[in-house]
Image (tube, rainbow, N blue to C red):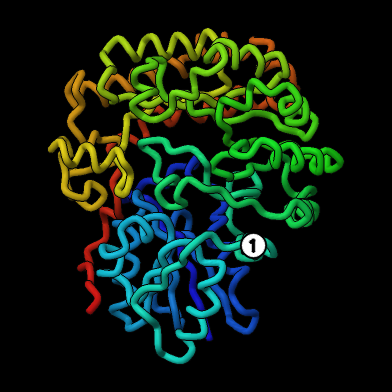
Amino acid sequence: MRLTIVHPCIGRKPGQKYIRTWQMESLPAATLAGLTPKDVEVRFYDDRMEKIPFDEATDLVAISVETYTAKRAYQIASEYRKRRVPVIMGGFHATLCPDEVARYAESVVCGEAEQIWPRVIDDARHGRLEKFYRQTGRPSLAGLKPDRSIFHGKRYLPIGLIEAGRGCHFKCDFCAVQTVFNSTQTRRPVDDIIAEIKPLKRERKLFFFVDDNITSNIEQAKEFFRALIPLKIRWVSQASINAAHDEEFLELLVRSGCQGVLIGFESLNPANLKDMNKAFNTMRGGFEKSLANLRKHHVRVYGTFIFGYDRDTPESFGETVAFAREHSLYIAAFNHLTPFPGTPLYKRLQDEGRLLYDNWWLDERYSYNRIPFQPRGMTPELLQQNCLAARREFYSWPSIAQRGFAGVNRSNWFMWRNFYLINALHRNDVSLRDHYPLGDESWKGQLLTAN
Protein backbone atom coordinates (compact mmCIF):
# COMPACT_ATOMS: atom_id res chain seq x y z
CA MET A 1 0.00 0.00 0.00
CA ARG A 2 1.19 3.53 -0.82
CA LEU A 3 0.40 6.49 1.46
CA THR A 4 1.02 10.13 0.54
CA ILE A 5 1.12 12.66 3.38
CA VAL A 6 0.71 16.33 2.41
CA HIS A 7 1.31 19.44 4.48
CA PRO A 8 -0.75 22.26 2.90
CA CYS A 9 0.51 25.84 2.79
CA ILE A 10 -1.66 28.73 3.99
CA GLY A 11 -1.86 30.15 0.50
CA ARG A 12 0.25 31.33 -2.38
CA LYS A 13 0.73 34.47 -4.43
CA PRO A 14 1.73 33.57 -8.00
CA GLY A 15 5.38 34.32 -8.70
CA GLN A 16 6.28 34.97 -5.05
CA LYS A 17 8.27 32.75 -2.69
CA TYR A 18 6.47 31.45 0.38
CA ILE A 19 7.20 33.33 3.61
CA ARG A 20 10.36 31.82 5.08
CA THR A 21 9.39 32.18 8.74
CA TRP A 22 6.40 29.89 8.10
CA GLN A 23 8.66 27.02 6.98
CA MET A 24 9.28 24.93 10.09
CA GLU A 25 9.26 21.14 10.17
CA SER A 26 5.84 19.54 9.88
CA LEU A 27 5.80 17.56 13.12
CA PRO A 28 2.21 16.29 12.59
CA ALA A 29 3.33 14.72 9.29
CA ALA A 30 6.33 13.02 10.95
CA THR A 31 4.11 11.81 13.79
CA LEU A 32 1.61 10.31 11.35
CA ALA A 33 4.42 8.66 9.38
CA GLY A 34 5.73 7.17 12.63
CA LEU A 35 2.29 5.71 13.41
CA THR A 36 1.99 4.10 9.97
CA PRO A 37 2.74 0.34 9.68
CA LYS A 38 6.21 -0.35 8.28
CA ASP A 39 4.91 -2.28 5.27
CA VAL A 40 3.20 0.87 3.96
CA GLU A 41 5.25 2.96 1.52
CA VAL A 42 5.12 6.56 2.78
CA ARG A 43 5.81 9.66 0.72
CA PHE A 44 5.64 13.21 2.08
CA TYR A 45 5.21 16.48 0.23
CA ASP A 46 5.36 19.93 1.81
CA ASP A 47 3.22 22.34 -0.18
CA ARG A 48 5.12 25.29 1.32
CA MET A 49 8.34 24.48 -0.52
CA GLU A 50 7.73 22.00 -3.34
CA LYS A 51 5.27 21.11 -6.06
CA ILE A 52 2.97 18.23 -5.28
CA PRO A 53 3.14 15.47 -7.95
CA PHE A 54 -0.59 14.84 -8.15
CA ASP A 55 -0.16 12.26 -10.92
CA GLU A 56 2.22 10.09 -8.91
CA ALA A 57 0.61 6.72 -8.13
CA THR A 58 -0.68 6.41 -4.58
CA ASP A 59 -3.48 4.57 -2.75
CA LEU A 60 -4.37 7.05 0.00
CA VAL A 61 -3.68 10.72 0.78
CA ALA A 62 -3.58 12.12 4.31
CA ILE A 63 -3.80 15.87 4.99
CA SER A 64 -3.65 17.59 8.39
CA VAL A 65 -5.88 20.68 8.27
CA GLU A 66 -5.64 23.88 10.31
CA THR A 67 -8.20 26.67 9.97
CA TYR A 68 -5.80 28.90 8.03
CA THR A 69 -4.86 26.05 5.66
CA ALA A 70 -8.39 24.71 5.12
CA LYS A 71 -9.00 26.36 1.73
CA ARG A 72 -5.68 25.15 0.33
CA ALA A 73 -6.23 21.68 1.82
CA TYR A 74 -9.56 21.42 -0.03
CA GLN A 75 -7.84 22.46 -3.28
CA ILE A 76 -5.23 19.74 -2.82
CA ALA A 77 -7.86 17.17 -1.91
CA SER A 78 -9.84 18.03 -5.05
CA GLU A 79 -6.78 17.41 -7.23
CA TYR A 80 -6.33 13.94 -5.78
CA ARG A 81 -10.00 13.07 -5.68
CA LYS A 82 -10.53 13.94 -9.36
CA ARG A 83 -7.80 11.33 -9.96
CA ARG A 84 -9.90 8.89 -7.92
CA VAL A 85 -7.49 8.77 -4.99
CA PRO A 86 -9.27 8.70 -1.61
CA VAL A 87 -8.38 11.51 0.80
CA ILE A 88 -8.49 11.42 4.58
CA MET A 89 -8.23 14.62 6.63
CA GLY A 90 -7.47 15.23 10.29
CA GLY A 91 -5.99 17.96 12.46
CA PHE A 92 -7.44 20.81 14.51
CA HIS A 93 -9.85 22.09 11.88
CA ALA A 94 -11.19 18.60 11.20
CA THR A 95 -11.96 18.28 14.90
CA LEU A 96 -13.52 21.75 15.14
CA CYS A 97 -15.51 21.57 11.86
CA PRO A 98 -15.90 17.87 10.99
CA ASP A 99 -18.99 18.26 8.81
CA GLU A 100 -17.36 20.97 6.70
CA VAL A 101 -14.16 18.96 6.24
CA ALA A 102 -16.19 15.85 5.37
CA ARG A 103 -17.52 17.64 2.27
CA TYR A 104 -14.06 17.48 0.71
CA ALA A 105 -12.72 14.11 1.89
CA GLU A 106 -13.68 10.47 1.84
CA SER A 107 -12.87 10.20 5.52
CA VAL A 108 -12.26 12.47 8.53
CA VAL A 109 -10.29 11.80 11.72
CA CYS A 110 -11.71 13.80 14.64
CA GLY A 111 -9.39 14.15 17.60
CA GLU A 112 -5.99 12.61 18.16
CA ALA A 113 -4.81 9.91 15.78
CA GLU A 114 -2.58 7.72 17.99
CA GLN A 115 -5.20 5.02 18.63
CA ILE A 116 -7.24 5.54 15.46
CA TRP A 117 -4.62 5.54 12.70
CA PRO A 118 -3.83 1.78 12.57
CA ARG A 119 -7.54 1.07 12.03
CA VAL A 120 -7.74 3.75 9.34
CA ILE A 121 -4.87 2.14 7.44
CA ASP A 122 -6.37 -1.33 7.77
CA ASP A 123 -9.76 -0.11 6.54
CA ALA A 124 -8.08 1.64 3.59
CA ARG A 125 -6.27 -1.58 2.64
CA HIS A 126 -9.59 -3.38 2.47
CA GLY A 127 -11.55 -0.61 0.75
CA ARG A 128 -13.89 0.03 3.68
CA LEU A 129 -13.00 3.53 4.89
CA GLU A 130 -15.56 4.99 7.24
CA LYS A 131 -16.72 8.58 6.89
CA PHE A 132 -15.71 9.54 10.44
CA TYR A 133 -13.19 8.17 12.91
CA ARG A 134 -13.69 9.78 16.31
CA GLN A 135 -11.26 9.55 19.21
CA THR A 136 -12.99 9.69 22.58
CA GLY A 137 -10.89 10.65 25.57
CA ARG A 138 -7.17 11.35 25.53
CA PRO A 139 -4.91 8.60 24.19
CA SER A 140 -1.54 7.90 25.80
CA LEU A 141 1.47 9.46 24.07
CA ALA A 142 3.80 6.71 25.29
CA GLY A 143 5.80 5.11 22.49
CA LEU A 144 5.29 8.01 20.08
CA LYS A 145 8.13 8.00 17.52
CA PRO A 146 7.95 10.66 14.78
CA ASP A 147 9.57 9.50 11.55
CA ARG A 148 11.85 12.38 10.55
CA SER A 149 13.22 10.55 7.53
CA ILE A 150 10.39 12.20 5.58
CA PHE A 151 12.16 15.57 6.06
CA HIS A 152 15.29 14.59 4.13
CA GLY A 153 16.12 17.02 1.34
CA LYS A 154 13.77 19.75 2.55
CA ARG A 155 15.07 23.16 3.67
CA TYR A 156 13.33 23.91 6.94
CA LEU A 157 14.35 26.53 9.46
CA PRO A 158 17.24 25.07 11.52
CA ILE A 159 15.14 24.34 14.59
CA GLY A 160 14.27 20.86 15.81
CA LEU A 161 10.62 20.44 16.80
CA ILE A 162 9.85 18.11 19.70
CA GLU A 163 6.54 17.40 21.41
CA ALA A 164 6.78 16.84 25.17
CA GLY A 165 3.10 17.36 25.99
CA ARG A 166 -0.17 18.16 24.29
CA GLY A 167 -2.99 20.42 25.46
CA CYS A 168 -3.35 22.96 28.27
CA HIS A 169 -5.34 23.13 31.52
CA PHE A 170 -6.38 26.76 31.03
CA LYS A 171 -9.65 27.81 29.38
CA CYS A 172 -8.79 30.95 27.46
CA ASP A 173 -11.80 32.36 25.65
CA PHE A 174 -10.09 32.72 22.24
CA CYS A 175 -8.04 29.51 22.20
CA ALA A 176 -8.99 26.50 20.07
CA VAL A 177 -6.60 24.29 22.07
CA GLN A 178 -8.93 24.29 25.07
CA THR A 179 -11.83 23.29 22.80
CA VAL A 180 -10.02 20.44 21.04
CA PHE A 181 -8.49 18.95 24.21
CA ASN A 182 -11.24 19.97 26.65
CA SER A 183 -8.77 21.91 28.83
CA THR A 184 -6.63 18.86 29.59
CA GLN A 185 -3.00 18.02 28.98
CA THR A 186 -1.24 14.73 28.32
CA ARG A 187 2.53 14.34 28.52
CA ARG A 188 4.93 11.89 26.96
CA PRO A 189 7.13 9.75 29.21
CA VAL A 190 10.37 11.63 29.88
CA ASP A 191 12.52 8.70 28.71
CA ASP A 192 10.76 8.73 25.32
CA ILE A 193 11.53 12.42 24.83
CA ILE A 194 15.17 12.04 25.84
CA ALA A 195 15.57 9.11 23.43
CA GLU A 196 14.13 11.24 20.61
CA ILE A 197 16.43 14.19 21.32
CA LYS A 198 19.76 12.34 21.65
CA PRO A 199 20.26 11.41 17.97
CA LEU A 200 19.23 14.92 16.88
CA LYS A 201 21.70 16.85 19.06
CA ARG A 202 24.44 17.00 16.43
CA GLU A 203 22.09 18.29 13.74
CA ARG A 204 20.16 20.87 15.74
CA LYS A 205 21.60 23.90 17.51
CA LEU A 206 18.19 24.80 18.95
CA PHE A 207 15.09 22.79 19.84
CA PHE A 208 11.53 24.04 20.04
CA PHE A 209 9.21 22.11 22.35
CA VAL A 210 5.92 22.69 20.56
CA ASP A 211 3.79 22.09 23.66
CA ASP A 212 0.76 24.35 23.89
CA ASN A 213 1.94 25.19 27.40
CA ILE A 214 5.06 23.49 28.73
CA THR A 215 4.24 24.84 32.21
CA SER A 216 0.66 23.58 32.35
CA ASN A 217 1.69 21.08 35.03
CA ILE A 218 4.61 22.70 36.85
CA GLU A 219 5.68 19.67 38.90
CA GLN A 220 5.80 17.42 35.84
CA ALA A 221 7.70 20.14 34.00
CA LYS A 222 10.32 20.27 36.78
CA GLU A 223 10.86 16.53 36.48
CA PHE A 224 11.30 16.93 32.74
CA PHE A 225 13.79 19.80 33.11
CA ARG A 226 15.91 17.75 35.52
CA ALA A 227 16.16 15.00 32.91
CA LEU A 228 17.15 17.53 30.22
CA ILE A 229 20.09 18.99 32.15
CA PRO A 230 22.66 16.28 31.22
CA LEU A 231 21.86 16.66 27.50
CA LYS A 232 23.23 20.23 27.42
CA ILE A 233 20.88 21.36 24.66
CA ARG A 234 19.41 24.78 23.88
CA TRP A 235 15.65 25.01 23.68
CA VAL A 236 12.63 27.34 23.61
CA SER A 237 8.94 26.74 24.22
CA GLN A 238 5.58 28.28 25.12
CA ALA A 239 4.69 28.94 28.75
CA SER A 240 2.07 30.60 30.92
CA ILE A 241 3.16 33.48 33.10
CA ASN A 242 2.22 31.85 36.41
CA ALA A 243 5.45 29.83 36.25
CA ALA A 244 7.50 33.04 36.54
CA HIS A 245 6.75 33.13 40.28
CA ASP A 246 8.25 29.71 41.07
CA GLU A 247 11.98 30.11 41.84
CA GLU A 248 12.81 26.40 41.67
CA PHE A 249 11.03 26.17 38.34
CA LEU A 250 13.00 29.08 36.88
CA GLU A 251 16.33 27.70 38.13
CA LEU A 252 15.62 24.30 36.55
CA LEU A 253 14.34 25.97 33.39
CA VAL A 254 17.68 27.72 32.87
CA ARG A 255 19.84 24.75 33.92
CA SER A 256 18.00 22.54 31.42
CA GLY A 257 19.06 24.81 28.54
CA CYS A 258 16.04 27.06 28.07
CA GLN A 259 16.97 30.10 25.98
CA GLY A 260 13.57 31.79 26.06
CA VAL A 261 9.84 31.31 26.37
CA LEU A 262 6.82 32.55 24.46
CA ILE A 263 4.34 34.08 26.89
CA GLY A 264 0.87 35.25 25.98
CA PHE A 265 0.51 38.59 27.78
CA GLU A 266 -2.45 39.32 25.47
CA SER A 267 -3.48 42.66 27.03
CA LEU A 268 -2.37 45.26 29.55
CA ASN A 269 -6.02 45.89 30.45
CA PRO A 270 -7.20 43.74 33.42
CA ALA A 271 -10.81 43.93 32.18
CA ASN A 272 -9.79 42.46 28.83
CA LEU A 273 -7.89 39.68 30.58
CA LYS A 274 -10.98 38.90 32.63
CA ASP A 275 -13.10 38.78 29.47
CA MET A 276 -10.70 36.32 27.85
CA ASN A 277 -10.67 34.18 31.01
CA LYS A 278 -7.00 34.96 31.56
CA ALA A 279 -7.10 37.03 34.73
CA PHE A 280 -4.40 34.75 36.17
CA ASN A 281 -1.94 36.86 34.16
CA THR A 282 -2.24 39.55 36.84
CA MET A 283 -1.56 37.26 39.81
CA ARG A 284 1.17 37.94 42.41
CA GLY A 285 2.27 41.35 41.24
CA GLY A 286 1.30 41.02 37.61
CA PHE A 287 3.51 41.55 34.60
CA GLU A 288 6.07 43.79 36.31
CA LYS A 289 6.92 41.21 38.98
CA SER A 290 6.90 38.23 36.63
CA LEU A 291 9.13 39.94 34.05
CA ALA A 292 11.54 41.02 36.77
CA ASN A 293 11.82 37.39 37.88
CA LEU A 294 12.41 36.20 34.32
CA ARG A 295 15.10 38.83 33.75
CA LYS A 296 16.78 37.91 37.03
CA HIS A 297 17.17 34.36 35.72
CA HIS A 298 18.20 35.57 32.23
CA VAL A 299 15.15 34.08 30.55
CA ARG A 300 14.42 35.88 27.28
CA VAL A 301 10.77 36.50 26.41
CA TYR A 302 8.79 36.35 23.20
CA GLY A 303 5.70 38.31 24.19
CA THR A 304 2.42 38.05 22.32
CA PHE A 305 -0.38 40.62 22.47
CA ILE A 306 -3.93 40.56 21.11
CA PHE A 307 -5.98 43.61 20.15
CA GLY A 308 -9.70 43.79 19.45
CA TYR A 309 -11.30 42.96 22.79
CA ASP A 310 -14.06 45.31 23.86
CA ARG A 311 -11.93 47.55 26.13
CA ASP A 312 -9.25 48.22 23.52
CA THR A 313 -8.96 51.75 22.13
CA PRO A 314 -6.56 53.33 19.61
CA GLU A 315 -4.37 54.32 22.59
CA SER A 316 -3.89 50.65 23.59
CA PHE A 317 -1.37 50.00 20.81
CA GLY A 318 1.17 52.67 21.73
CA GLU A 319 0.96 51.76 25.41
CA THR A 320 1.61 48.11 24.60
CA VAL A 321 4.58 48.78 22.33
CA ALA A 322 6.08 51.05 24.99
CA PHE A 323 5.63 48.26 27.55
CA ALA A 324 7.30 45.71 25.25
CA ARG A 325 10.24 48.03 24.64
CA GLU A 326 10.56 49.05 28.29
CA HIS A 327 10.86 45.39 29.29
CA SER A 328 13.22 44.60 26.39
CA LEU A 329 11.26 41.69 25.03
CA TYR A 330 13.46 39.61 22.72
CA ILE A 331 10.72 39.58 20.09
CA ALA A 332 6.99 40.29 20.23
CA ALA A 333 3.79 39.81 18.24
CA PHE A 334 1.04 42.41 17.99
CA ASN A 335 -1.92 40.61 16.45
CA HIS A 336 -5.60 41.24 16.07
CA LEU A 337 -8.09 38.94 17.72
CA THR A 338 -9.11 36.03 15.50
CA PRO A 339 -12.32 34.11 16.26
CA PHE A 340 -11.56 30.45 15.53
CA PRO A 341 -14.51 28.10 15.07
CA GLY A 342 -15.42 26.10 18.15
CA THR A 343 -14.11 28.65 20.65
CA PRO A 344 -16.27 30.50 23.20
CA LEU A 345 -15.16 33.73 21.50
CA TYR A 346 -16.49 32.61 18.11
CA LYS A 347 -19.87 31.63 19.54
CA ARG A 348 -20.21 34.92 21.44
CA LEU A 349 -19.40 37.05 18.41
CA GLN A 350 -21.73 34.93 16.31
CA ASP A 351 -24.57 35.33 18.82
CA GLU A 352 -23.96 39.09 18.91
CA GLY A 353 -24.04 39.32 15.09
CA ARG A 354 -20.49 40.70 14.97
CA LEU A 355 -18.90 38.21 12.55
CA LEU A 356 -18.27 39.91 9.20
CA TYR A 357 -17.99 36.69 7.17
CA ASP A 358 -19.66 33.31 7.12
CA ASN A 359 -16.73 30.95 7.68
CA TRP A 360 -14.05 33.60 7.14
CA TRP A 361 -11.43 30.94 6.35
CA LEU A 362 -13.31 30.05 3.13
CA ASP A 363 -14.72 33.44 2.16
CA GLU A 364 -13.27 34.82 -1.10
CA ARG A 365 -13.23 38.33 0.39
CA TYR A 366 -11.04 37.34 3.32
CA SER A 367 -7.23 37.38 3.34
CA TYR A 368 -4.62 36.94 6.05
CA ASN A 369 -4.67 39.63 8.78
CA ARG A 370 -7.99 41.03 7.59
CA ILE A 371 -10.34 41.57 10.55
CA PRO A 372 -13.18 39.01 10.45
CA PHE A 373 -15.38 40.63 13.11
CA GLN A 374 -16.69 44.03 14.22
CA PRO A 375 -14.69 45.42 17.17
CA ARG A 376 -16.40 47.73 19.66
CA GLY A 377 -13.69 50.36 20.16
CA MET A 378 -12.69 51.07 16.54
CA THR A 379 -13.39 50.10 12.95
CA PRO A 380 -11.97 46.83 11.57
CA GLU A 381 -9.73 48.87 9.26
CA LEU A 382 -8.32 50.90 12.14
CA LEU A 383 -7.67 47.75 14.16
CA GLN A 384 -5.68 46.25 11.30
CA GLN A 385 -3.74 49.49 10.65
CA ASN A 386 -2.85 49.89 14.32
CA CYS A 387 -1.57 46.30 14.59
CA LEU A 388 0.66 46.95 11.59
CA ALA A 389 1.90 50.25 13.07
CA ALA A 390 2.69 48.51 16.38
CA ARG A 391 4.83 45.93 14.58
CA ARG A 392 6.65 48.62 12.63
CA GLU A 393 7.44 50.56 15.79
CA PHE A 394 8.63 47.54 17.76
CA TYR A 395 10.82 46.31 14.90
CA SER A 396 12.20 49.74 14.03
CA TRP A 397 16.00 49.92 14.08
CA PRO A 398 16.08 52.15 17.20
CA SER A 399 13.87 49.64 19.04
CA ILE A 400 15.98 46.68 17.92
CA ALA A 401 19.20 48.44 18.99
CA GLN A 402 17.75 49.44 22.38
CA ARG A 403 16.45 45.96 23.16
CA GLY A 404 19.60 44.31 21.86
CA PHE A 405 21.72 46.01 24.51
CA ALA A 406 19.45 45.02 27.39
CA GLY A 407 21.18 42.77 29.92
CA VAL A 408 18.75 39.87 29.55
CA ASN A 409 19.23 39.74 25.77
CA ARG A 410 23.05 40.00 26.04
CA SER A 411 23.37 37.40 28.80
CA ASN A 412 24.04 34.56 26.37
CA TRP A 413 26.37 34.81 23.36
CA PHE A 414 24.37 32.35 21.21
CA MET A 415 21.08 34.20 21.68
CA TRP A 416 22.66 37.68 21.41
CA ARG A 417 24.40 36.71 18.17
CA ASN A 418 21.06 35.59 16.76
CA PHE A 419 19.07 38.49 18.23
CA TYR A 420 19.77 40.83 15.33
CA LEU A 421 19.15 38.20 12.65
CA ILE A 422 15.84 37.12 14.22
CA ASN A 423 14.65 40.69 14.70
CA ALA A 424 15.65 41.58 11.15
CA LEU A 425 13.59 38.64 9.87
CA HIS A 426 10.60 39.85 11.85
CA ARG A 427 11.18 43.39 10.62
CA ASN A 428 11.07 42.08 7.07
CA ASP A 429 7.84 40.20 7.84
CA VAL A 430 6.02 43.21 9.33
CA SER A 431 3.68 43.66 6.35
CA LEU A 432 4.47 40.54 4.27
CA ARG A 433 1.58 38.62 5.79
CA ASP A 434 -1.04 41.34 5.42
CA HIS A 435 -3.67 40.33 2.86
CA TYR A 436 -1.84 37.09 2.09
CA PRO A 437 -4.32 34.84 0.28
CA LEU A 438 -5.82 31.74 1.85
CA GLY A 439 -5.48 29.10 -0.85
CA ASP A 440 -3.41 29.21 -4.03
CA GLU A 441 -4.51 32.19 -6.13
CA SER A 442 -3.26 30.49 -9.31
CA TRP A 443 -5.34 27.34 -8.77
CA LYS A 444 -8.05 27.15 -11.44
CA GLY A 445 -9.70 23.90 -10.46
CA GLN A 446 -13.10 23.28 -8.90
CA LEU A 447 -13.57 22.11 -5.34
CA LEU A 448 -14.99 18.60 -5.46
CA THR A 449 -17.44 17.69 -2.75
CA ALA A 450 -17.75 14.14 -1.45
CA ASN A 451 -20.90 12.08 -1.60
In the image, is 194 to the left or to the right of 268? right
SS of the residue under disc 1: loop
Q: Which residue is mark 1?
A: 146
Tell me if residue 72 comes above or below residue 331 in the rendering.
Answer: below
Query: Picture quarter containing residue 335?
Result: top left
Seen in the image, is 115 located left or right of residue 146?
left
The answer to whether residue 204 is seen in the rendering is: yes
Which residue is rendered at x = 57% and y = 36% of the image? 238
Residue appearing at x 63%, y 12% in the figure: 292
Q: Position of residue 343 (x, y in %)?
A: 33, 44
Q: Work out whether residue 13 can be spotted.
A: no
Q: Quadrant of residue 330?
A: top right
Residue 169, percent from left and from top: 52, 41
State the residue lying farthest toward the bottom.
126
Q: In this view, which residue lies farthest toward the right?
A: 230
**Is residue 54 depicted above or below 385 in this figure?**
below
Query: Callout 1: 10 Å neighbours few (<14), some, many (20+)?
Result: some
Identify the residue shown where x is 46% and y is 85%.
123
Q: Residue at x 70, y 42 (%)?
A: 220
Q: In this view of the protein, which residue sits in the foreground, 400 or 163? A: 163
Residue 101 percent location from the top left of the image? 30, 64
Q: Work out whether 7 lies above or below 400.
A: below
Q: Amino acid at mark 1?
A: Pro
Which x, y percent locates residue 250? 72, 25
Closest to the observer, 135 or 409: 135
**Near-viewer residue (74 or 102):** 102
Q: How many marks?
A: 1
Image quadrant containing the C terminus: bottom left
